[in-house]
Image: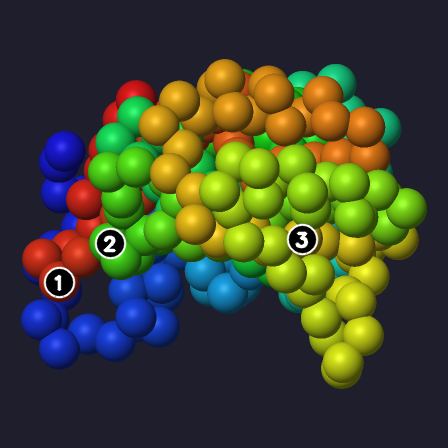
Amino acid sequence: MTSTQPPASAAMSQDELKTLVGQAALSFIVPGEIVGVGSGSTVNKFIAALASMKDQIRGAVSSSLASTERLRALGIQVFDSNEVDRLSVYIDGADEIDHQGHMIKGGGAALTREKIVAALSSKFVCIVDESKLVQTLGKFPLPVEIIPMARRRITQQFEALGGRVQVRLKGGQPLVTDNGQIILDVSGLQIADPRAFELEISQWPGVVTVGVFAFQKAQVCLLGTASGVKTMTF
């Protein structure tokens, strides 16, 4: 792990650390190319920083409607994922990341589109603060996007694994994703083998996307800490 930024104040807030890693991610942008852009509060900091070099890139492919709106508001062209064959880099946050680059994502409900854009990209750069670094995935509830008619059966399958399942709500009703589906949040899991776990859950009928990113794991993590932005490579 190496430091890539000057030391930060020990009193820096989580929001300030997000700004720091968002700015640090600019060094991975390839001029003249299209950038893969994720979603969430840390990515919002990256999008704000990206505006400073928008004239040096062709545009972006976005993983959420919210990020698309932010990018367009800053004058950055947004391409549909079907318009590109490959992205040199994808910048996104995570709810958790382990020391091998495996992640849990989906706290912002965009996990399916995030996984699609990650699969298009040659390099995944994860931007997080140090509170997201874990030894074993599972501290953060696992988001799983599902087709609603499979909710009961998938819930029972997770309960058989020791998980506790809640349907994610918004305004007292099940949250509807950008893809028109719902999300289950599963707590109480310890995911010791992320690749095997992702492979198994992905095969359950009715699962659209499981929020374990093992096959589309990060190659680089920019970790915001009190002593600066530290770079982890996997």
Per the model, the C-alpha gap separating discs 1 and 3 is 34 Å
Q: Label 3, secondary structure: give it.
A: strand
- Provide the residue designation for mark 2: 130
Q: Label 3: how many residues lie within 10 Å, few (<14), some (14-19) or many (20+)? A: many
Q: Position of residue 50 (x, y in %)?
A: 52, 54
Q: What residue do we see at 66% from left, 36% from top?
A: 157
Which label's residue is closer to the chain start, 2 or 1?
Answer: 2
Relative height, residue 100 to residue 196 (above, below):
below
Disc 2 from disc 1: Cα separation: 9 Å
Q: Quadrant of residue 85?
A: top right
Q: Residues within 10 Å of mark 2 (few under 14, many from 20)?
A: some
- Nearest to the eye among marks 2 and 3: give it: 3
Of residues 188 and 95, the one nearer the viewer is 188
The location of residue 51, given as percent across then percent down, is 55, 59
User: Which amino acid type corresponds to the residue marked 3 in the rendered image?
Assistant: Leu
Q: Residue at x 81, y 74 (%)?
A: 173
Asked if labels 1 and 2 touch by Cβ distance under 8 angstroms, the answer is yes
Q: Nearer the viewer, residue 212 or 152?
A: 152
Residue drawn 43% across and 50% down? 188
Front: mark 2 or 1: 2
Q: Which residue is mark 1?
A: 226
Which kind of residue does numbered mark 1 sit on? Ala
Q: Earlier in the sequence, mark 2 or mark 3?
A: 2
Q: Residues within 10 Å of mark 1 (few under 14, many from 20)?
A: some
Q: Quadrant of the N terminus?
A: top left
**Residue sitting nearer the eye, 69 or 175:** 175
Write down the residue under mark 3. Answer: 184
